[in-house]
């Protein structure tokens, strides 16, 4: 279904891909600013990693995440379940419960997940489910079944989140257009930023966003710009793409740090990623739209009552 194959030589070697102390930020974020894409890992004595996984990241528990957000001036967050923990979403549910209404989640489920299971996740503060179409995760998804799942997601007021390799965008787009719920595309579709605004995958992404059903996370400026951050300012190509998307599709863009940056080629500085927002969203109106208004519209923080059903 949606489970990666284990790679023993990777799974036995925990790798830390986040800084214990990021740089102080120069940018003051608006009230209720939201980081819509992070993960939590462990602690493994309470939340063990799945047996079938592609790697073993260093532990990154909710306490470290909360401390990071306090340091960066981020008040709200959406935690995305990782394949490292498989289909047991309890590590994210635990963090949501500890977040006192300011943290929500996106779950991993089997494509045949029942309406009852989805309703239970929604009551815990999960607002969507994620599926991977990435070669390194070894995932295989029945697309007919996935479209069927979106009708059950609609009943639970949840959305579909998809993470795919850019080479698959033309193949997958017709399927995603049949979704009964909004579709959130991760990390700017992982396009190659060196191709610029005219790159074929980026243009295909823009055509999808002409349909209001779709949203895009303009996270991963460090992933689509794969070179080490030696430029000043860092990640100019990723910033260019993110700014263009926000300017052209202001109501459909979301932002996230992607902390703790699993499966990365280098260790990003979260302070630098936050400060890049000054160039991605250079006006107060765009910053408010990206960090506050759009997350509230999609994730409905105000509708979630800590300690009670959503």
Image: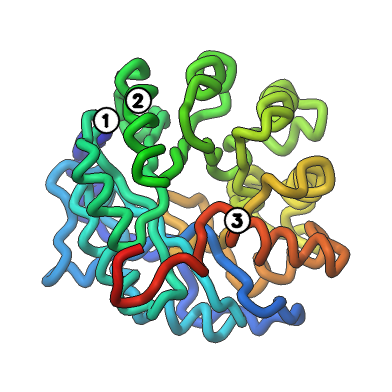
- 18 on left or right of 45: right
- Residue 175 at x, y percent in the picture: 48, 18
Q: In the picture shown, does residue 26 fall above or below 53?
A: below
Q: Residue furthest right?
A: 283
Q: In the picture shown, does residue 203 fall above or below 79?
A: above
Q: Which residue is mark 1?
A: 111
- Residue 1 at x, y percent in the picture: 23, 28
The circle on residue 297 is 3
Q: Label 1 crowding class (10 Å Cα cut-off): few <14, some 14-19, many 20+? A: many
- Residue 229 at x, y percent in the picture: 68, 58
> Is residue 202 in view from this perspective?
no
> Is residue 298 in view from this perspective?
yes
Q: Label 2 crowding class (10 Å Cα cut-off): few <14, some 14-19, many 20+? A: many
Q: Label 3 crowding class (10 Å Cα cut-off): few <14, some 14-19, many 20+? A: few
Residue at screen point 27% across, 33% down: 2
- Residue 194 at x, y percent in the picture: 74, 36
Q: Nearer the viewer, residue 199 or 158?
A: 158
Q: Nearer the viewer, residue 244 or 200?
A: 244
Q: In the picture shown, does residue 300 fall above or below 308?
A: above
- Secondary structure state at the residue bearing disc 1: loop
Name the N-terminal-most of marks 2 and 1.
Answer: 1
Tell me, yes or no, whether the two marked residues, 2 and 1, touch with CB atoms within 8 Å: yes
């Amino acid at each position: 279904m949606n489970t990666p194959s284990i790679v023993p030589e990777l799974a036995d070697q925990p790798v830390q891909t986040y800084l214990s102390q990021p740089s102080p930020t120069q940018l003051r974020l608006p009230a209720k600013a939201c980081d819509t894409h992070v993960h939590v890992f462990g602690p493994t004595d309470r939340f063990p990693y799945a047996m079938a996984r592609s790697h073993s990241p260093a532990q990154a528990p909710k306490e470290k995440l909360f401390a990071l957000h306090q340091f960066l001036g981020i008040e709200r967050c959406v935690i995305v379940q990782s394949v490292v923990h498989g289909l047991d979403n309890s590590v994210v549910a635990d963090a949501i419960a500890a977040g006192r209404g300011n943290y929500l989640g996106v779950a991993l489920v089997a494509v045949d997940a029942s309406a009852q299971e989805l309703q239970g996740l929604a009551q815990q503060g999960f607002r969507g489910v994620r599926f991977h179409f990435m070669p390194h995760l070894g995932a295989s998804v029945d697309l007919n079944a996935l479209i069927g799942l979106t009708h059950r997601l609609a009943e639970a007021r949840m959305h579909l989140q998809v993470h795919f390799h850019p080479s698959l965008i033309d193949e997958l787009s017709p399927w995603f257009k049949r979704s009964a719920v909004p579709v959130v595309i991760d990390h700017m579709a992982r396009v190659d930023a060196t191709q610029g605004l005219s790159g074929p995958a980026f243009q295909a992404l823009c055509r999808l966003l002409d349909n209001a059903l779709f949203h895009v996370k303009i996270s991963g400026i460090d992933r689509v710009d794969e070179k080490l951050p030696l430029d000043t300012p860092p990640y100019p190509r990723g910033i260019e793409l993110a700014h263009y998307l926000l300017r052209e599709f202001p109501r459909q863009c979301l932002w996230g740090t992607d902390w703790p940056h699993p499966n990365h080629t280098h260790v990003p500085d979260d302070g630098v990623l936050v400060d890049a927002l000054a160039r991605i969203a250079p006006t107060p109106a765009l910053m408010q739209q990206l960090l506050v208004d759009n997350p509230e519209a999609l994730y409905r923080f105000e509708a979630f009552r800590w300690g009670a059903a959503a």
